[in-house]
Image (spheres, grey):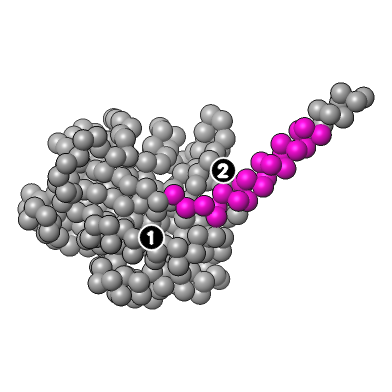
Amino acid sequence: MDAIYVILTVIAGLALLYILWCLAEPFFLDMDKAVLKNSPRKDGPNNNIVINKLPMTGQGEVSAPDLRFFFFSDIHAEWCPVNAGRICDAIRASHTASALDGVIFGGDIITYPGNSAKGFRYINQVSACCKELGIPFYGITGNHDVYFEDFAEKAGFISLDNKALLLTSRTSGKKAFLAGVPDSGTKKLVWPEMPSCEGDDPVILVAHDPDTLIHIEPGKRPDFMLSGHLHGGQMKFPFKIEFRILRKKDKLPNMGAVQGTFDINGTAVFISRGLGCGIMPFRFLSVPEATVVEIYL
């Protein structure tokens, strides 16, 4: 009986530690860097998806990047202990270290429409920070943002939904399109088409759901893509059970593209873990993340 009591006590202790960690992890913030390099696009069919995991930062970089963005996604303000003040501080520090060409929001201010006021307070604080620093603030509509009319105006960012803006690198003079697509929401999912980008300049696409990439016509795929939506799995379990059961319709995460940088059919992709928690206020082995994305055209 003593041995059984000890075993049960140990199991209960481990379970308590696990629960406490899951509750504590959303309070952390991982400020990291992702380096994306242009490579020849592969125009093969969408039913032949080739995914190669890439390191977050390139080795031996000596030249300045062509474009430098601060990217964050998935606030889900109902349970986002990483408050807007911390994101603003991170933006200021990143801009001071080396000037940013823009701040980009990848969608989802809330989980439930009734909590919109909290979400808009958060994103408006970031918008005010960007205006103070003179940095353009761009954004797109996430799947939980489709309920709001005039979403971009209320959020205070420059909408990239179905648009393509031509940017010029301050370091090299090279040009690239910064484009975006809105999410249609999960109830009536419709995959968006690529915005029109005239010319041969590289295209950086901001799409909330990474699976957007594999629904774009091969000849129109972007050179780069920034996404969120997956929360890095949020609660990681063995054998990717969180995707096989809860997100079994999502193709890329079930093929291994969950978080970080990838080459997917020739497109350099960054998938963020996001900031907040969707539905459940827990994270496990998926620390909230905001990222400086450096792009080499």
Residue assigned mark 2: 284
Q: Is residue 75 in view from this perspective?
A: yes
- Quadrant location of the N terminus in the rendered image: top right
Q: Is residue 188 in view from this perspective?
A: no
Name, please, the residue furthest toward the right.
1
User: Is 6 displayed left or right of 234 in the figure?
Assistant: right
Could you tell which of marks 1 and 2 lies nearer the N-terminus?
1
Q: Position of residue 280 (x, y in %)?
A: 60, 53
User: Which amino acid, mark 1?
Assistant: Ala
Residue shown at 41% from the left, 73% from the top: 125
Q: Secondary structure at mark 1?
A: helix
- Magenta stretch? 9-30
Residue shown at 25% from the left, 68% from the top: 136
Does 101 appear in magenta? no
Q: Judge by depth and name the residue closer to the eye, 167 or 140.
A: 167
Magenta highlight: main SS: helix
Q: Position of residue 57 (x, y in %)?
A: 29, 40
User: Is 253 displayed left or right of 7 in the figure?
Assistant: left
Quadrant assignment, res 71: bottom left
Name, please, the residue furthest toward the front.
97
Q: Position of residue 216 (x, y in %)?
A: 26, 45
Residue shown at 31% from the left, 70% from the top: 130
Residue shown at 21% from the left, 35% from the top: 60
